[in-house]
Image (tube, rainbow, N blue to C red):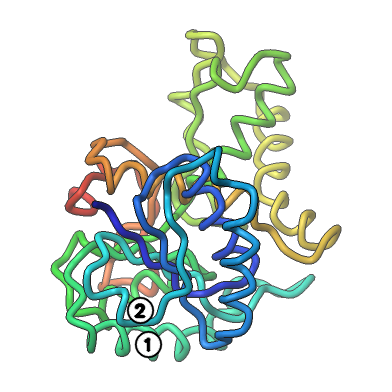
Amino acid sequence: MSKVSIIGAGLVGSTIAYALNLKEIADTVALVDLDEKRVKSEVLDLRHGHDDLSKSQVIAGTYDDCKDSDLVIITAGLARKPGETRIELLEKNKKIMQDICQTINQTGFDGVALIVSNPVDALTNVASEALNLPLGRVFGSGCVVDSSRLVALLAEKFNTPVQNIKATVVGEHGENMKIDWENIKINGKKYIFTDAQKQELNDAVRLTGMHIIEGKGKTYYGIATSVAEISNAVLKNKKAVLSVSVPDLAKDAAVVKLTTVDANGIKL
């Protein structure tokens, strides 16, 4: 029986719970937050109407649920405001992440930890240092969502289903991300982009998150489905190659690169 604990019941955490349940990725999903009233309300809402869609169980959890969880997903932290950079957000969320990790350590958690809180690359390093877990068992959601954004843009540009696009973003989640131009395939064939096309696509992907925040205040659907994909790789030992945040304690932040993800976390 697989179990996931999600720390943070805001829009991102709750939407991740929704995605995990719809896809039946985990048998049990425990939603954990200091705001117990919100957790109970989110769980009630998630339970209603999904009996015919999923056999997964969602529960209002506590940090104690981490003890027997296979995967802990940390989404808690202050949300990014319009116009705010990820670096500005780091100073606010670093202490929150350290406190969360200390509480998780007290439960004896010995599974895999996936960091989603922003700025994800920097906070992945913070969590890797703070959690009592071996190297490789802590990593971040990285550029999986950025890669999805790139794929969606290319599918629209070339008028083809997203399933026919192979494209990856690496480097860093957000404004400083890098597109892997050499390995983009469209309908099974490599495509050579002009410098103007590269600039246009790079800007479009880089600024997508900010545009969404300016329009509706938060992003959560894209990251939730991306986290569901990563969670599936961990819980079902898929050995999927994904663009995730790999801790690098010699630097200020984790590095996003294509890495094998399985039941043991990431392959270093």
Q: Please indicate, yes or no, whether residue 88 appears anywhere in the rendered image.
A: no
- Pointer 1 residue: 98
Q: Position of residue 207 (x, y in %)?
A: 72, 52
* Residue neighbourhood size for the residue with mark 1, other residues' Cα within 10 Å, grouped as few (<14), some (14–19), many (≥20): some
Q: Is residue 242 left or right of residue 23?
A: left
Q: Nearer the viewer, residue 42 or 230?
A: 42
Q: Residue furthest left?
A: 134
**Quarter of the figure with residue 114:** bottom left
Q: Position of residue 95 (x, y in %)?
A: 45, 91
Mark nearest the camera among 2 and 1 is: 1
Question: In the image, what residue occupies the spot 72% across and 42% down?
Answer: 204
The local secondary structure at tag 1 comes to helix
Q: Is residue 268 left or right of residue 139?
A: left
Q: Are dots 2 and 1 in contact, CB under 8 Å?
A: yes
Question: In the image, what residue occupies the spot 48% across and 45% down?
Answer: 144
Q: Please say if 268 is above or below 92.
A: above
Q: Nearer the viewer, residue 195 or 171?
A: 171
Question: In the image, what residue occupies the spot 25% across and 60% down?
Answer: 70
Which amino acid lies under the numbered mark 1 shown in the image of this protein? Gln
- Pointer 2 residue: 126
Question: In the image, what residue occupies the spot 33% across and 76% down?
Answer: 127
